[in-house]
Every structure is written in C-alpha cells, then in structure tokens.
Amino acid sequence: MAELADYLDLTVGQARQQFRELKRRSPVSSGRQAVFLPVETLLCLAVSFQINHRRFGGSTAHLAPEPIPSLARLFSRPNSSILAKMANLDGSRSHGGKHDILAGAILRDEPAHFTHVYRTLLTAARSEGIGPDRLPDFLGLEQGGEFDLLGQDELSPSTLENAFKDQIAKAAATTTWTEQETERILLAAARVGQHLFAQNVLANCGGRCVFCGLNPNPFGGKRMLVAGHIKPWKDSTSTERMDLRNGLAACPSHDVAFDTGLLTVDAALQVHVSGALADAVRKDPLTQQYYGRPPLRDTIMLPDQAQLPGRKYLDWHQANIFAA
C-alpha cells in the first residue's frame, strides 16, 4: 500500500517505473480493477482542478470531457474509474484511501509543491515515450509557470471556519480522521470547488469584465479579472456556490464596487449605480473615469452563448447588498 511520501515526494525515477507498469497493463472489461498507482492518483488530482466530477454519474461517465478519456486510455480503465478516484480524493466518498485523500488535501493547499509534482509526472512520462498525444499537458505547466487557485478572495479563514465548523466536528467524531486532518480535507475541497466555479464563470463571461468590457488576456493581466459570486459564498448553499449563474467576472475596481453594494444588476441585466457613487461621479473627475458611463455599460456585457445570471441571485443582491 502506498504511503504519503509516495505521493508527496515522488521522484522521476519512481514515476518512470510506474509508467512502465501502466504501459504493460491490459484493460479489465469487468470485475475488480487494478489498484491505482501513485502516478494515476496524482494525475486524477490534477484533473480535479479542471473538471467537477460531480457533474458525471455512472450513466454519464462516458460524457466526461478531456483529459478524462485520455487518462482512462493511458490507465487502461473506464472513465467511471477516473471519476471515482477524483471523488475519493476530495473526501466525498468515505471509503477513499487515507493517504490518497490526505495527499490530495496537502497538494491542493500547496500550489508550488503541486506544480513540482505535476512536472515530475510529465517529465517521467515523456522519458518513457508517452507524448502529449497520450498524456496532454492539460494544466499548461510543463514548460513553466506555477499553478494558482482562482477566486480565493471570498474564502477568508473565518468564512471557511464558520461554514465548516459543525461538519468538521461531526466528521472527526465519526471517522478515523483527526479533527485537524478533517479540517484540511474539507477546506482543500472547498478551495478547489471555488477554483472550478471561478474558472467556469470567467469562461462564461468571455474573459471580460461584464461592467466595462476590459479584456486583460492579450497583455497577460491575469489578476486584472476576477470571478465572484453574486450571492456571496458565505450566504449560499453548497449547490449555489458551484452554480455559474451565481457568478460574474469583473475587473478589480468594478468587482469591489459590486461586492460592497455600489453597483448592482437587475433582472433585465441593466447596471445600476448607488446614489452615493452617482454623486461622487458627478463631483470627481477621477471617480467618473472608473464609474461613469463610459466605462460602465448600461447593461452587462456577455457573449451570445453565455448562461445568463440567475434571477434569484440578482434579486438577492439588490435586496441584501445594494445601497440604493
């Protein structure tokens, strides 16, 4: 059985040996699958930063997008096996392997460490003749850069503690995990869920600020566009936290204004400015440059194919946050 160090301290040599074993493996059409090797588990962890496994059940596993089918072929397993391992890793399945789950929580919480492990996997795979056609660099880190979780500003330590304190105590009392381990697993899963949410919202909004249209991608301004909840994470149910219709992408200036009630959006997708901000726009030329019209649009800017913000979230924001 693999130990924690087999995941966290994986070497290129160890990974190469495991990839050689994978290349010799024959697919199993029925019955018990082979035990997951650390390289398989770690690649499933990497996929969890791109795909929400909860969207695909037993009857829809065949619909899971890349890179899940590529990993399934490389591992000689069905898609459903990859998805099940992803569920094990975030602690949503109680019978997941202890070291699998704990390693996943640690690496989710340490982006630099995870980036190193991910590159170790790809380096070993390439050394064994497994090219990008069989194992794509689906996180785009093979040639450099460091992995970064998106959308983490909403998840302050106090917000997470308040959201999970009862669940942490209950789980620690009914499982083999200590309270500290339980907390790390649950909080890591929440952070990855927020990353997936932000990733989907940014894509749904076309990579632009919905309030002014700023697109920072051409000049590499990654931190100049953020994805946040309309109804804040702390006030949302677990389902609402992952619903991309509960999110908007905005540049930092307009994101803060929306979060603090200086801006809101109505059911017709029209942008409204609070009285205090409107007064400041009339009196202060610098404020006008950021919150006048332009740059503010009359209605939010979304691609033609985008899912529109949910009416219930917009109504909640107007009733609970907007300072008319």
Image (cartoon, grey):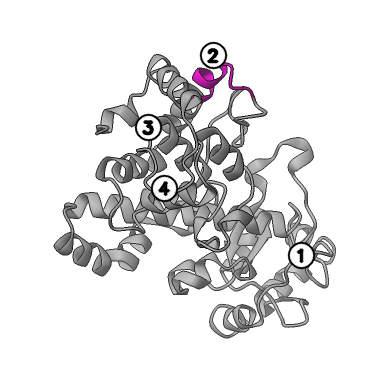
Query: Which secondary structure lies at badge 2?
Result: helix
Instruction: Mark 4 and mark 1 in contact? Answer it, CB < 8 Å.
Output: no
Residue at numbered disc 4: 85
**Alpha carbon of mark 4 to alpha carbon of mark 1: how far?**
31 Å
Is residue 81 part of the magenta span, yes or no?
no
Q: Which of the pair 194/97 is nearer the observer? A: 97
Question: What residue is disc 2 on?
Answer: 127
Element type at marker 3? Answer: helix
Which residue corresponds to the image point at 59% horizontal and 73% vertical from the top-left? 261
The answer to whether residue 251 is above or below residue 27 is below
Residue type, numbered disc 4: Lys
Q: How many marks?
A: 4
Q: Which residue bears the numbered disc 1?
A: 306
Left or right? Give the position of 203 relative to 162: right
Q: Which quarter shows the N terminus?
A: top left
Label whose residue precedes the other's in the sequence (4 or 2): 4
Asked which quadrant contains residue 280, the reply is: bottom right
Residue name at image x 28 percent, y 58 percent: 94
Q: Nearer the viewer, residue 130 or 286?
A: 130
Location of residue 228 by image quarter: bottom right
* Residue type pointed to by label 2: Ser
The magenta stretch is 121-131
